[in-house]
Amino acid sequence: MFKIKAIHTPTFFESAALIAGIVLVISVSIIGFDSVPHLPILFSILLLIGYGLLKRIPFRRLEKGLVDGAGAGMSAVFLFFFIGILISSWMMSGTIPSLIYAGFHLITPTFFFAIVFVVTAIVGVSIGSSLTTVATVGVAFIGMASVLELSLPLAAGAIVSGAFFGDKMSPLSDTTNLASSIVGVDLFEHIRNMGWTTVPAFIISFLFFGALSPNVTTGEFEKVAVFKETLLETGMIHWYTVIPLVVLFFLTIKKVPALLTLAVSSAVAVLLSFLHHTYGFTQILEILFKGFVSSTGVKDVDELLTRGGMESMMFTVALVLLALSMGGLLFTLGIVQSLLAQIETLLKKVSSVIMASAVTAIGINVLIGEQYLSILLTGQAFQTQYEKVGLANKNLARVMEDAGTVVNPLVPWSVCGIFITDVLGVSTVEYLPFAFFCLLSPILTILFGYMGKTLTRIA
């Protein structure tokens, strides 16, 4: 998409007005009317097409911009399909249930907030979904904090921090896959590169939560016990269930392409599932497409384990294609180029480019409240600028996650912020000061940019 040539040169005022109009349409639809982002993006595409027609640009050329933009995301689309298959196969094999079970064994009354942070991080990485983590184990932990008469905002901050660590670092996460695909970086190379900012943020957050944790010696941990007992009763908790994860790590180290790595790990997981459950071939195909359905009878556990399948990725795939199509039009009409031209003189240093891209990702989260768009639009707008200052694309992918993915839950009117407040019963403003990991990530990425540390130059 970033090679799409402009066929029109709008004025700065026209470009700014169109962007303001798009932001208004999307933000009002999502925040004011609780709409899914797909429709306002489609309306924005129509707005851009209308502008192009007013400027006497042939519809065929506008259509080509749409198609070229969507084409840039096809690698991400195929990756998303295999992610859906991987999740359902790892459920079948017991890999994800076993990882969650191991995480629950870490819970003790001592250093409660620090351990909640670690366990939600483990669960988040295991299932690749921050909101699912919050809605399941997060609810259990907020209940425990209430029983133990501990700070609910602090507990919520630990839950959100851990959940979004998982969302950011999991190879199963759609945002992680999206960020790597949008700038053409291998998924696992992207995850390794994020470690430079994510690991320090994780360690500092852990120390903060540890220092703020009271030593609780009494109280009931019945909810954790119910989770563990129910997971054991599924018959899927076994030592060999970690083999698909080991295969994933091994192939990653060998630098096998992400799509092939996911496919092989999924195949191994399906084969291992026969050690504790016999599935018919028709059942396997249905699970891989529609997802794994848990039937333990315990609502929270079933919500946690009912996941995956190609079908589950259709929402994300549709959103990605629509957003990239809009991006294709923005480039075709020269709108992005017009806006960047106004600040290009300020973007000649590495530090200023990183700062501008981080502020853009944060700004989109604040103005529109949508996590995916903060990643997509930032990636679309700044890839050329990173190339001009000699930075490899994986630096941009890291900034998109550090200042995009993990910032969304800090915005009260964002999709994640509203969801978390509803589920945990703690307002965004209350838990925001304690969501240490989410606060530290954009700070560290900007700081490292100014220091010139942990950056990869174009070879």
Image (tube, helix red, strand yellow):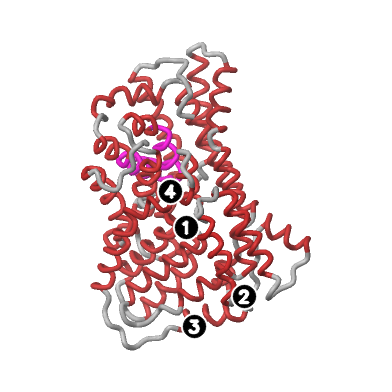
Q: Magenta stretch: give its range.
A: 358-381
The quadrant of the picture occupied by the C terminus is top left
Which residue position holds label 3? 225
Which is more N-terminal, label 2 or label 1?
A: 1
Identify the amino acid type marked 1.
Ser
Judging by the rendered image, the residue that carries numbered circle 2 is 236
Query: For residue 372: magenta?
Result: yes
Disc nearer the start of the sequence (2/4):
4
Residue depicted at 39% across the width and 29% down the height: 19
Q: Is residue 121 left or right of residue 250?
A: left
Vertical arrangement, residue 318 with respect to residue 297, above or below: above
| In magenta segment, residue 163 | no
Tag nearer the camera, 2 or 4: 4
Residue designated by label 4: 190
Between disc 2 and disc 3, the foreground one is 2
The disc, 2 or 3, on the residue closer to the chain's N-terminal end is: 3
Q: Residue furthest left?
A: 451
